[in-house]
Amino acid sequence: MFKILLIEDDATLFGEIKERLSQWSYEVYGITDFGRVMQEFTEIKPDLVVIDIQLPKFDGFHWCRNIRSHSNIPIIFLSSRDHPSDMVLSMQLGADDFVQKPFHFEVLIAKIHAILRRVYNYNTDTVSLKTWCGAQIDYEKNIVTNEKGTVELTKNEVFILKLLIEQKNKIVSRDNLINSLWDDKKFISDNTLTVNVNRLRKRLEEIELGQFIETKVGQGYRAIEEDSV
């Protein structure tokens, strides 16, 4: 049974989401003190976090930064604000997905299903270590290491990198990536993929690997080997 931490201060919405998720046998927890979110996060040890942007004391962005400094757990943002910058910022902070309020519960549940299935199942059928461009990628620990150092990736970032490396030196279409990441592209903004890939590339730039993820305008992305540049 997966544990989901729902960081939402609207008691009515919290109850509705909890009831729907409980029907799928998810164990749903809430926050009792919005000044102690990290303490409760540590105590609960959830498998996934759903977090609203507008919260008492500190906003969801604040808590996302704090969670990301300690964990690569999947994070889905909820927002009632119609600002594209909110979605972009949430992705830049390491969120895995973004849901605009008001939303259909089926959409939120589908996104949760897809993320949990991808994050906790994909390592079972792949080699945990992979070498690419002189770096070692650990799919289980979500880290990339070379002589320049080590960077830690989010679940989405390492999954995108895995998909690209599996087809190295070949273009992987945007549709292919979106469908592999989120199962149903009708629920996903095209900009969501762009933000995720840009975030991956920025992380890889820290160890001088960013240039090996190429954007092919109108087509998709390509991971190239160092000796093919």
Image (cartoon, helix red, strand yellow):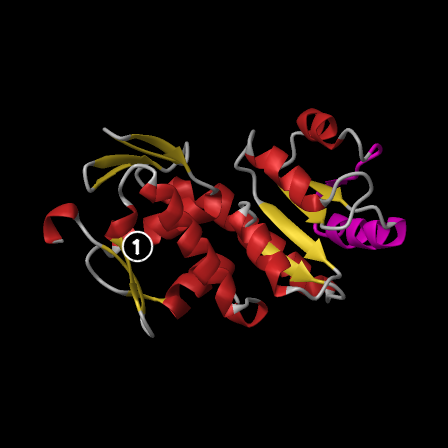
**Residue picked out by circle 1:** 164
Specify the quadrant of the image occupied by residue 79: bottom right
Which element type, helix, strand or loop, lies under badge 1?
helix
**Can residue 1 be seen from the camera position used here?**
no
Which residue is the extreme one toward the bottom?
Answer: 218
Residue 22, magenta (yes or no): yes
> Which residue is more in the foreground, 46 or 84?
84
Which residue is at 34% across, 49% downward?
161
In magenta stretch: residue 108: no
Looking at the image, the residue that sits furthest to the left is 227
Where residue 37 sits, quadrant-wise, is top right
| For residue 219, side relative to residue 23 (left or right) | left
Residue 164 % position (x, y): 30, 54
The percent coordinates of residue 88 (x first, y second) are 56, 57
Identified at 56% across, 29% down, the residue is: 70
Q: Position of residue 138 (x, y in %)?
A: 34, 34
Residue 74 placed where, x, y %? 57, 44
Q: Which quarter of the image is occupied by the N terminus? A: top right
Q: Residue at point 26% right, 51% down?
A: 211
Task: Give the left or right position of residue 130, taking residue 195 as reference.
Answer: left
Q: Local crowd at mark 1 within 10 Å, few (<14), some, or many (≥20)?
A: many
Q: Which residues are magenta?
A: 11-33
The number of numbered discs placed on residues in the rendered structure image is: 1
Report the amino acid beneath label 1: Leu
Residue found at x 73% / y 44%: 59
Q: Horizontally, is 63 left or right of 225 in the view?
A: right
Above or below residue 228? Residue 6 is above
Q: Is residue 184 visible?
A: yes
